[in-house]
Amino acid sequence: MKVLITGSAGFIGFHLVKQLVKQGDEVIGIDNLNDYYDRKLKYDRLAILGINKSNINYGVELNSDKFVNFKFIKLDLTDKENLKKLFKKYKFDAVCNLAAQAGVRYSLINPDAYLESNITGFLNVLECCRHEKVGHLVYASSSSVYGLNKKMPFSVSDNVDHPVSLYAASKKSNELMAHTYSHLFNLPTSGLRFFTVYGPWGRPDMALFLFTKAILEGKEINIFNNGIMKRDFTYVDDIVGGILRVLANPPKGNPRWDELNPDPASSKAPYRIFNIGRGNSVNLLNFISEIERNIGIKAKKVYLPMQDGDVSETWADISELKTEFDYEPKITYKEGIKKFVNWYKIYYSLNKEPAGKSSLSRAILNQ
């Protein structure tokens, strides 16, 4: 397939691009390379994909020097005119929209960023997919949409009308916008509600990254809701495996969809919503204990009340993904933490070496 990956310098996007190019697809990646977190991590991910930081300029198409079937362009989703030109040039078979302003807590202090990227940017993607008749749009939603729901595990058939952060509301909006385009223009769309993705090359604002960094530096870690927290931690390779299965199978309308008893996860239109997680919930304190075990240092814990916009537990019902695509997560949180800590130690030790002595091509960094 000819595939567009938005957010290709991001955590999940980077891992997805690697798998798509390895399986022979033609991949175009775009990313605005914003400064929400350290750009160096984004540039180093791109270096693994064969894109040299020194060659990156806005709107300039770059060929990978490692993969003949990968190109990268620095581009913002709010740049509608250049986005339209890109879609018209490549006539994509499929689009995977992973570009977004992420972070629940950040949405409390910078709400405008979420409307620009997650609403306006996503509308531009939908419009381009519509006009260029893209065969399938897969897009990132989030477990955050479940909001005040307490019924566990979270099911895609549950009501999600009570978000507790603007980030969650923007992701719920994406699902509604996608359904509208599926209904009006017969555009096949699949929304994936990601559950706490982690692993090598992860985002520095996520818990595993924050905890590992602080413990290694002898600093305190903040544990919210006094440690009474559970998360469905999902290793990035399992996430990517699920995306690949969904991407290759555009949805069709559900002939059994009932207007009198409407299923929120499907439609008469070519529209689907899936949870994509590991399918179990891990106590946060157990997760932290495993980090401590791998690092060999006890964390200095500070217990705090629940933060606004956060929830105490997430747990994904992944039965639909299992039934339809044989999705079966393989990596336990203990295995995943070990892989991440090993990567973190090596990556940051290399970046402390004198200039010219470190090499991102070392085998362990290519995982």
Image: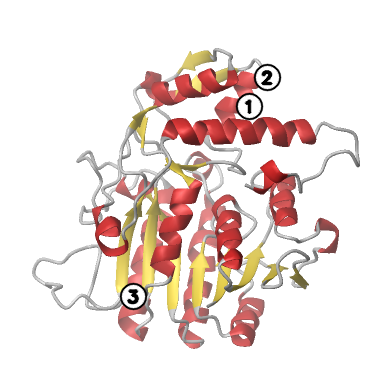
Query: Which of marks 3 and 2 precedes in the sequence?
Result: 3
Secondary structure found at label 2: loop
In space, the residues marked 2 and 3 are separated at their CA atoms by 49 Å
Tag 3 residue: 180
| Neighbourhood count class around disc 2 (C-alpha, 10 Å): few under 14, some 14–19, many 20 upward | few
Tag 1 residue: 213
| Residue 222: x %, y % from top left | 51, 22
The residue sitting at 61% across, 67% down in the picture is 21
Image side of residue 115 versus residue 45, left or right: left
Image side of residue 60 versus residue 285, left or right: right
| Residue 52: x %, y % from top left | 81, 59
**Viewer-closest of 102 and 190:** 190
Query: Which amino acid, mark 1?
Result: Lys
Query: Which of marks 3 and 1 precedes in the sequence?
Result: 3
Tag 2 residue: 217
Residue 363 shows in this picture:
yes
Secondary structure found at label 3: helix
Q: Are marks 2 and 1 in contact (CB under 8 Å)?
A: yes
Callout in the foreground (2, 3): 2
What is the number of the mark on residue 251? none
In space, the residues marked 1 and 3 are separated at their CA atoms by 43 Å
